[in-house]
């Protein structure tokens, strides 16, 4: 029976049923969500409900998104990810692709153990969108090694795992403690998994050091994420055989770039210098020179160094050390653009008119001598007329001021086309000379950061566009259109804070997201709204097929500017050079297996990011140890039935205020408004609220921070808060180290 608008169900379960009936009927042809709802004659007032219903159906696999974005009927969906097994027997699978966790009942584990990589079939979803499934295959065993902290007990001890979801603690008999002492970070081999009434038992196989000492937390994270810490012997040997200096014969046949004089601009603690810039004025506009260390000259495809770099995919940066993609002979010497030393580069020379529109581009094998190693802070001070220390030479200063004018043009043009910038604060861990953490600094971005960002973006776009127009193979950096269901969730979230996305989730544009974030500029909720907006977008990835870059509002984009620390950039250097030389065999060789390479590099990048993020969070929590009882200002970043998540402004550490610590009143969760409201007084605490909290307990092992509300702080009365007009958004770029 065909439904009329008046007969459409007005509850979540009914809406799901109506959608399923429609897509399963005979003769249905896949449609976009917008056309589907129009075809069902869903009233405009009911469309938000039906979009939420469609989101739940997609997550459960009962409908599927087909190529091109249309929707069709689906069977049970498979997902792959790591399983966390609770001591009580049930588990949760965190899918590799962004999405909610899948609950697995004890009888559906199929022999999977904690930490295994599994395939899970999604079998059901409840009214709140929570997924349930069953393990259908164990793809990879995690192994029986567990990392944790050793606690002495009589002659033996127990190991408390660092993973909060791991079963534990693990009993260690005296004969198996292997010299571990109280508080040591250890690796333990699980000899007996344990059961419902008995703990697991294990043997210490590696002592990493006393927890709290410099570098021990880094060592734990490296082991947990199975990162490479040493180079294979053949790669190290090849690095030792590299020339002691840039070959004079090679430098002699390359184009020299001495005027304008190139400079490197990096952070004070930067560990590699693989890009240099210079800018000059030309009739009607500007000429930008972006010089990138020519790693491809020294590393041939298939060589030991190349195989090692491909296996790593990326350098991994921790506060106290770096795991480089290449040995120091390359990363800190031959391919480091040191001042006043000749270095081989691949150069992009870009001409722009005075509005920032590109006019011409060419590429060259070059040789440069960097005129100076400058820092962001030094350059920003100099171009703003503030005395810099050390001072910037006058001739270089003139070039930098020209560069800043070009930066402004490029920035204005990029924002005009709709590019999104999430100017989220990034903490910097401060260490003393022995590597012991002394503090956390949250530093604002300055004009020098933004300058380098704009120039690197311009070079990346230019290379990708050049290869795209020529029909040559290219390893693209793509950022696809966001999932409409996630955009709908973002719109609901924004509405709860008093903001409006104002865009069709099926056809959202980058500028729609940017306007939403800009509307909260200068208000306490700006950071949390930016974070949620960022999470609503898809992850950028590598691909052999161009799909554009949503976040940058760029039709074509690739990574070219960091071949010393990102393997895709090295691959792109090879493709560009082979194409420029018209070497078809070299183009074919460099372009072999690009799709497999893209998938591998995307996966390695995500793993590196997870390790960097884990250590940063660990250090932030550990730094709070000893500050129990202190009060801090913070912002509410999450609301749940069991309490509030609060991020501290001073350190950006996040902790939990449990609902029982909110006071004597009973608090009710209002999902749509994203707030906890007191039943008796009606006073509410909402997402994005500024609060003052007290640190109650710090657990560095499980990385947990327990908070309570400061008695001097009181929540606002219920009801939508008033909003003042948002300030004009400040335009800032992301860091060069970002993984756009």
Image (tube, rainbow, N blue to C red):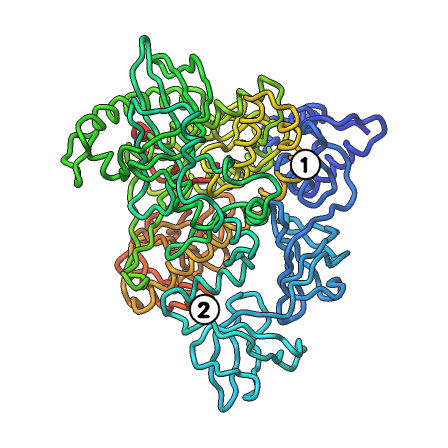
**Residue 432 coordinates in the image, percent (x, y):** 27, 60
* Percent position of residue 204, x then y: 55, 78
Name which residue lies at 54% across and 51% down: 235
Relative to 650, is 301 on the left or the right? Answer: right
> Outermost residue, front direction?
249
On the image, which quarter does residue 43 sit in? Answer: top right
The quarter of the rendered structure image containing the N terminus is top right
Residue at the extreme bottom: 154
SS label for mark 2: loop
Tell me if residue 597 comes above or below residue 685 in the rendering. above
- Is 456 left, or right, of 692 in this rendering? right
Q: Closer to the observer: label 2 or label 1? A: 1
Kindly indicate the quadrant of the structure image that contains residue 277.
top left
Q: Position of residue 64 (x, y in %)?
A: 72, 37
Q: Is residue 731 visible?
A: yes
Residue topped by disc 2: 701
Element on which disc 1 rests: loop
Instruction: Classify mark 1: residues with Cα within 10 Å, few (<14), some (14-19) or many (20+).
Output: few
Location of residue 352 by image quarter: top left
Q: Residue furthest top?
A: 283
Picture residue at 29% right of the left edge, 66% below the top: 627
Residue 593, labelled with which disc? Answer: 1
Q: Nearer the viewer, residue 286 or 337?
A: 337
């Amino acid at each position: 029976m065909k439904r009329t608008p008046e007969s459409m169900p007005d509850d979540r379960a009914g809406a799901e049923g109506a959608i399923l009936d429609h897509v399963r009927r005979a003769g249905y042809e896949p449609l976009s969500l917008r056309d589907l709802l129009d075809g069902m004659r869903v009233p405009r007032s009911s469309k938000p409900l039906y979009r939420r219903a469609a989101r739940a159906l997609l997550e459960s696999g009962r409908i599927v998104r087909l190529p091109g974005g249309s929707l069709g009927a689906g069977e049970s969906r498979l997902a792959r990810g790591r399983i966390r097994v609770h001591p009580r027997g049930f588990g949760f699978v965190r899918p590799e692709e962004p999405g909610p966790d899948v609950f697995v009942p004890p009888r559906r584990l199929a022999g999977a153990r904690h930490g295994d990589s599994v395939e899970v079939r999604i079998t059901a979803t409840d009214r709140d969108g929570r997924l349930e499934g069953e393990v259908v295959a164990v793809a990879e065993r995690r192994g029986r090694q567990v990392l944790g902290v050793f606690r002495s007990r009589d002659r033996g001890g127990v190991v408390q795992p660092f993973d909060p979801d791991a079963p534990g603690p693990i009993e260690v008999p005296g004969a198996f403690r292997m010299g571990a002492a109280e508080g040591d970070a250890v690796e333990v081999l699980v000899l007996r998994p344990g059961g419902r009434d008995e703990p697991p038992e294990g043997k210490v196989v590696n002592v990493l050091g006393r927890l709290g000492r410099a570098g021990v937390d880094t060592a734990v994270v490296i082991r947990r994420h199975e990162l490479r810490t040493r180079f294979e012997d053949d790669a190290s040997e090849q690095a030792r055989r590299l020339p002691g200096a840039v070959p004079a014969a090679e430098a002699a046949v390359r184009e020299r770039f001495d005027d304008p004089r190139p400079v490197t601009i990096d952070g004070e603690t930067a560990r590699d210098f693989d890009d240099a810039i210079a800018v000059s004025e030309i009739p009607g506009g500007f000429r930008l020179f972006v010089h990138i260390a020519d790693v491809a000259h020294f590393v041939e495809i298939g060589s030991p160094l190349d195989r090692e770099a491909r296996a790593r995919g990326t350098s991994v940066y921790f506060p106290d050390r770096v795991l480089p993609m290449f040995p120091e002979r390359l990363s800190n010497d031959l391919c480091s653009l040191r001042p006043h030393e000749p270095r081989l580069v691949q150069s992009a020379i870009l001409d722009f008119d005075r509005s920032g529109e590109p006019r011409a581009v060419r590429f060259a094998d070059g040789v440069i001598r960097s005129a100076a190693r400058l820092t962001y802070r030094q350059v920003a001070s100099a171009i703003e007329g503030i005395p810099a220390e050390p001072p910037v030479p006058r001739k270089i200063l003139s070039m930098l001021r020209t560069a800043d004018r070009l930066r402004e043009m490029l920035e204005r043009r990029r924002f005009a086309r709709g590019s999104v910038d999430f100017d989220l604060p990034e903490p910097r861990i401060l260490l003393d000379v022995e590597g012991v953490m002394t503090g956390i600094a949250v530093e604002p971005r300055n004009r020098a950061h933004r300058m380098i960002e704009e120039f690197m973006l311009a070079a990346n776009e230019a290379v990708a566009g050049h290869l795209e127009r020529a029909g040559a193979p290219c390893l693209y950096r793509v950022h696809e259109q966001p999932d409409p269901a996630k955009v709908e969730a973002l719109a609901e979230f924004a509405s709860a804070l008093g903001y409006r996305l104002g865009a069709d989730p099926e056809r959202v544009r980058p500028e729609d997201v940017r306007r939403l974030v800009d509307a909260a500029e200068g208000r306490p909720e700006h950071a949390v709204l930016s974070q949620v907006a960022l999470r609503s977008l898809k992850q950028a990835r590598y691909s052999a097929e161009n799909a554009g870059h949503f976040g940058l509002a760029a039709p074509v984009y690739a990574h070219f500017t960091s071949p010393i620390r990102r393997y895709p950039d090295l691959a792109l250097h090879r493709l560009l050079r082979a194409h420029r030389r018209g070497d078809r065999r070299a183009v074919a060789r460099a372009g072999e297996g690009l799709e497999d390479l893209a998938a591998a590099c995307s996966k390695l990048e995500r793993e590196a990011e997870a390790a960097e993020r884990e250590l940063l969070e660990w250090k932030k929590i550990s730094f709070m140890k000893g500050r129990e009882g202190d009060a801090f200002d913070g912002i509410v970043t999450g609301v749940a039935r069991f309490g509030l998540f609060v991020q501290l402004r001073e350190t950006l550490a996040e902790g939990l205020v449990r609902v029982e610590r909110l006071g004597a009143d009973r608090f009710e969760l209002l999902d749509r408004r994203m707030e906890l409201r007191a039943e008796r007084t009606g006073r509410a605490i909402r997402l994005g609220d500024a609060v003052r909290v007290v640190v109650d307990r710090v657990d560095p092992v499980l990385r947990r921070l327990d908070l309570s509300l400061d008695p001097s702080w009181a929540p606002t009365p219920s009801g939508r808060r008033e909003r003042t007009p948002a300030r004009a958004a400040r335009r800032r770029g992301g860091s060069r180290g970002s993984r756009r």
